[in-house]
C-alpha cells in the first residue's frame, strides 16, 4: 500500500531518502528551509567561477553505487546512473601532507623514509574497503555483516580506538602515525574518540582512491535531486519547518499531514521541532573557517589538488578544540583546482579550510588566525604570497554560518557519539517503537559521518521502511 511521507530537510540524507521511498511507490513530499537543496553541500559562484562548498571529497564510492543500484532495483525505465548524471573522477593521490618539516603523498612515494612502513600498513588495511562498505550499508543482522565485522576485528584485536590501535604498531614511525591519526578530524574529533576504523580509512583511501565528481561535489546533491524528481517527489524549498507532531509537519505556509515523517536534519533541530529542549551537548565535533576564492594566477605545477597542513603538535590541536579554544596551529586543507579541472571554470580556484573550534563565532579574512595559518600554509607550499592574498575574489564561511545548520557552535559533524556508539551501533535509532511514525536519517543519526555514512544510513533506513510500510 502506498503511504504518504514527509521528509524534513533537503540535504544529501533527505534527498536520497525521498528519492528511494518515492521510487518504491510512496507519495513523498520533501521540505527544505533554505532556498537551495544539498544542505551542507552547496554550490556558489564567485566572480563567475563555480565553487562547491561543504564536502570536497567522495570516499567509499561503493556506497554511492549501491544507492544507484537500489534505485534501479525498485522500478524500470532509464537507469539511475543516467538520471543522476554523476561521474566520479579519481584524484591521482589522496593528498600531500606537510608535517614537522616533512612532506609526503598518500600513498607514500618510493624513496621516502616512511615508504616501507606505509606499504606494510596499506597492505594490511587497504583491502578493507569492502567490509567497511558492508558495515556502512547493511543492517547489523544481515548475514553479510558478520564476516565484515570479523575481518575488521581481526586487524584491531583489542585495540578498538584509532589512538590505541596506532600506539600498538611499534614498527610504524611516530610521525606517520600522526598523519594517519589526523584523519579522525573527518569525524571532527580526536583519535581516542574514534573507532580504529578511522586509521584504516587512510589506507583504504590510498588503495581505492578519493574521488570528486566531474563538475564538483555538488553534482551528488544534483544527482539525488534528479532521482527524487524522476521518482515523483514534491519538493518545497525556502519553507522552514516550525514544528513536527505525530504524522504532521508545520511550516509558516502550511501543515503537511502524512503517514510518516522522516527527520533528515541535525539531531538538535529535530528535538526542538518536536517541542523538546535539547540538552546542550557535552562534547562537540570541530567547526571550520573556510575561505573560497578565485586565484590571480595558477599555483606552481607541483601543488596537488588536495594539500594537508598539519599542526606541529596534533595533541595541542585536539586539546584546544575540546576546550573550544583557538589552537596555536591548526590542521588545514587546501583544495586547488586549475582552470578547467573538475569545474568548468576558466580561472583557477582554491578553498582553504581551517579546522576551528566550535565557538559559533564569525570570522574574517583579517583575523590573526586566518592570516597566520594561511601564511604558514603558503610558506610550506613555497608560495610567494599568502594564499588568501592571492585570491582576487573570495568568500568566507565560519562557525556562525555552520551553526545555521543547527549544530551548537557550528560543529561540522554535530555532537559526536562515543566511539562504541558509532557505525552500526549508532544512537539514536532510525525508528523507535514509541514513535512509529517518525524515522531519522542523515546527520541526526550519523554525527561524525561523511557522505558514505549518511548515504549508507539511508540505504539501511529505507530498506527497513520498505519492509515496514
Ligand atoms: C566543511 C565541511 C566539509 C566536509 N567535508 C566532507 C568531505 O570531504 N567528504 C564527506 O564525505 N563528507 C564531508 N562533510 C560531511 C558531509 O557534508 C555531511 O555528512 C553531509 O552533507 C550531511 O548531510 P545531511 O543531509 O545529513 O545533513 P545536512 O546537509 O545538514 O542537511 C540537513 C538539511 O536540513 C535543512 N533544515 C534544517 N532545519 C530545517 C527546518 N527547520 N526546516 C526545513 N529544513 C531544515 C538544512 O537546511 C539542510 O539542508 C563535510 C561537511 C562540512 C560542513
Image (tube, grey):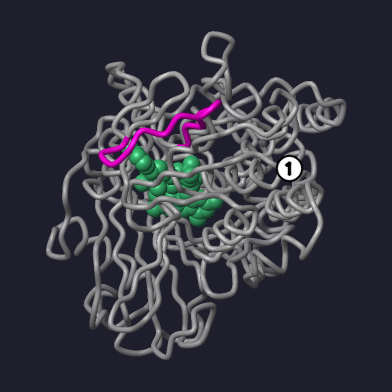
Query: Residue 297, percent across and down?
Result: 34, 90
Which residue occupies the foreground of this view, 338 or 134?
Answer: 134
State whether residue 225 appears in this view.
yes
Crowd class of label 1 (few under 14; some 14 to 19; many from 20; radius 10 Å): many
Identify the residue shown where x is 53% and y is 63%: 222
Q: Is residue 146 left or right of residue 63?
A: right
Location of mark 1 (residue): 133
User: Residue 72: horizontal and vertical position, in percent?
Assistant: 78, 53
Q: Give, as a single range, the part of the protein colored magenta.
A: 251-264
Query: Is residue 16 rendered magenta in the image?
Result: no
Residue nearer the viewer, 296 or 442: 442
Residue 430: image x %, image y %?
A: 58, 24
Under tag 1, what secondary structure?
Answer: helix
Determine if the magenta segment contains residue 256. Answer: yes
Q: Where residue 128 sits: x, y (%)? A: 77, 44
Q: Which residue is drawn at 51% across and 50% down?
A: 234
Front residue of this view, candidates 88 and 188 = 88
Amino acid at each position: 500500500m502506498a503511504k504518504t511521507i514527509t521528509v524534513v530537510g533537503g540535504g544529501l540524507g533527505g534527498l536520497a531518502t525521498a528519492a528511494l521511498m518515492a521510487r518504491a511507490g510512496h507519495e513523498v513530499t520533501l521540505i527544505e528551509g533554505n532556498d537551495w537543496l544539498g544542505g551542507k553541500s552547496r554550490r556558489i559562484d564567485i566572480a563567475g567561477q563555480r565553487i562547491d562548498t561543504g564536502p570536497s571529497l567522495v570516499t567509499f564510492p561503493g556506497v554511492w553505487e549501491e544507492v544507484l543500484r537500489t534505485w534501479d532495483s525498485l522500478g524500470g525505465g532509464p537507469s539511475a546512473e543516467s538520471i543522476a548524471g554523476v561521474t566520479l573522477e579519481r584524484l591521482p593521490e589522496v593528498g600531500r601532507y606537510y608535517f614537522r618539516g616533512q612532506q609526503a603523498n598518500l600513498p607514500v612515494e618510493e624513496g621516502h623514509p616512511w615508504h616501507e612502513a606505509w606499504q606494510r600498513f596499506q597492505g594490511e588495511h587497504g583491502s578493507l574497503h569492502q567490509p567497511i562498505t558492508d558495515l556502512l550499508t547493511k543492517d547489523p543482522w544481515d548475514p553479510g555483516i558478520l564476516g565484515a565485522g570479523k575481518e575488521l576485528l581481526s586487524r584491531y584485536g583489542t585495540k578498538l580506538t584509532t589512538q590505541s590501535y596506532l600506539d600498538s604498531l611499534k614498527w610504524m614511525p611516530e610521525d606517520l602515525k600522526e598523519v594517519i591519526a589526523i584523519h579522525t578530524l573527518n569525524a571532527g574529533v580526536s583519535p581516542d574518540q574514534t573507532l580504529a576504523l578511522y586509521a584504516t580509512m587512510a589506507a583504504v583511501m590510498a588503495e581505492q582512491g578519493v574521488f570528486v565528481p566531474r563538475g564538483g561535489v555538488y553534482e551528488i546533491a544534483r544527482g539525488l535531486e534528479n532521482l527524487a524528481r524522476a521518482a515523483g517527489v514534491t519538493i518545497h524549498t525556502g519553507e522552514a519547518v516550525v514544528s513536527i507532531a505525530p504524522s504532521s509537519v508545520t511550516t509558516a505556509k502550511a501543515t503537511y499531514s502524512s503517514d510518516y515523517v522522516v527527520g533528515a536534519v541535525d539531531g538538535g533541530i529535530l528535538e526542538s521541532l518536536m517541542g523538546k529542549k535539547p540538552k546542550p551537548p557535552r562534547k562537540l565535533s570541530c567547526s571550520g573557517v573556510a575561505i573560497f576564492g578565485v586565484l590571480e594566477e595558477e599555483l606552481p605545477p607541483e601543488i596537488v589538488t588536495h594539500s594537508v597542513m598539519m599542526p606541529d603538535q596534533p595533541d595541542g590541536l585536539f586539546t584546544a578544540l575540546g576546550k573550544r579554544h583557538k589552537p596555536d596551529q591548526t590542521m588545514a586543507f587546501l583544495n586547488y583546482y586549475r582552470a578547467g579541472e573538475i569545474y568548468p571554470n576558466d580561472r583557477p580556484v582554491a578553498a582553504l579550510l581551517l579546522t576551528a573550534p566550535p565557538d559559533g563565532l564569525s570570522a574574517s579574512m583579517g583575523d590573526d588566525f586566518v592570516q597566520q595559518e594561511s601564511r604558514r600554509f603558503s610558506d610550506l607550499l613555497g608560495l610567494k604570497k599568502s594564499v588568501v592574498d592571492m585570491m582576487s575574489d573570495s568568500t568566507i564561511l565560519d562557525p556562525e554560518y555552520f551553526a545555521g545548520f543547527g549544530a551548537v557552535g557550528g560543529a561540522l559533524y554535530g555532537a559526536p557519539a562515543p566511539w562504541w556508539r558509532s557505525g552500526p551501533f549508532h544512537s539514536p535509532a532510525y525508528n523507535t517503537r514509541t514513535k512509529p511514525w517518525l524515522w531519522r536519517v542523515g546527520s541526526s543519526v550519523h554525527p561524525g559521518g561523511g557522505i558514505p555514512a549518511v548515504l549508507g544510513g539511508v540505504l539501511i533506513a529505507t530498506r527497513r521502511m520498505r519492509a515496514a510500510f
